[in-house]
Image (spheres, rainbow, N blue to C red):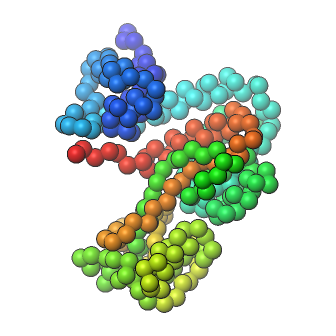
Amino acid sequence: MKDPIDSRQLHIFLTLARKGSLRLAAQELHITNSASSHSIHVLEESLSAKLFHRPGKYLILTERGHYLSKEAAEILMHMDRVRTQLAGPLLDEHATFRVAAGFNFVHRLLPDVMREWQQCFPKATLAAQAAERDTCLQLLKTDAVDAAVMVDPPDDSEWEQVSLFDDELRLLVSPHNPLARAETVTLRSLNQKVLIVSRLQSHTTQLILAETRRRGFNFRECIEVGSGQALCEMIKVGAGIAFVAEWALPQDMEEGALVTRRLDDVRINRRWAYVRRKHTTANLMNRTFLRLCQRVSEPLIPEPQAI
């Protein structure tokens, strides 16, 4: 019988797969480059499989490496759950953990977090609410929630922040819109177009409007529709244009029903982060929620490109 796979080696492997660099992985793990390299070498030897291509500055996953990265994340998540279950009796089993999160995170990623979290704490309650960025901050300030997941939290000593992933807003149009077939799309080419937004006062909408005003033009009209699903339906019928992060689009969207385009002259980026007040104690439920948020965010972190 072969020896079981070492969990520490798996953790180093996943960090290296995400960072793509021995140096960056070693810095995050607080180990030496040689220790990181040796761990991967031992893992490859034990599995009789090459996990990385090494063409230059960055490391690139092989086909077997891609397979292991998916399986390893699940293995470590289950190990975390076992550890959490063993520590569970130290908590109030019927406690409620309160969170607020951005609408897209709630609709697309939070269900996976809640499913795993409920397995860790079967008698407890994860009370989640969708909220805009400023509302999340207000809920934290008044201790109405224990933690929040939001875009672009302010740099303030009052908050403890852990970055989860960055995304980029892209132009969303109907395939019949001339912009879908244009060779290049610039922000200025959208002057006097109709902008469709989910919520007019959201941080994301204000980010878009601020960028257009900075460049000296405006949209002809800004229509608020209340939800991401309604926004997509409006775009499908050609009612206007929108800006979205591709990961937040409906999963059941018909193939070819919508087209996303990257702007050539500007990048509108957002940073998603886990936030809590520093004066509060990060108990086991809090730490578990953070770990699960990091797990579901990993597929949204781009892999380093070889130079």
Q: Give above or below for 240 relative to 38.
A: below
In the displayed structure, does residue 50 sit left or right of residue 249? left
Q: Give above or below for 184 relative to 140.
A: below
Front one among 25 and 109 = 25
- The answer to whether residue 138 shows anywhere in this view is yes
Residue lying furthest left in this view?
55
How many numbered markers are drawn?
A: 0
Front one among 305 and 105 = 305
Q: Residue at x 37, y 38 (%)?
A: 19
Residue lying furthest front in this view?
157
In the displayed structure, does residue 157 sit left or right of residue 95? left
Front one among 74 and 265 = 265
Q: Quadrant of the N terminus?
A: top left
In the displayed structure, does residue 223 sit left or right of residue 36? right
Residue 72 point in image, percent of width and height = 43, 31
In the displayed structure, does residue 113 sit left or right of residue 28? right
Residue 286 point in image, percent of width and height = 68, 39
Name the quadrant containing residue 25. top left
Front one among 199 and 5 = 199
Q: Residue at x 52, y 75 (%)?
A: 210
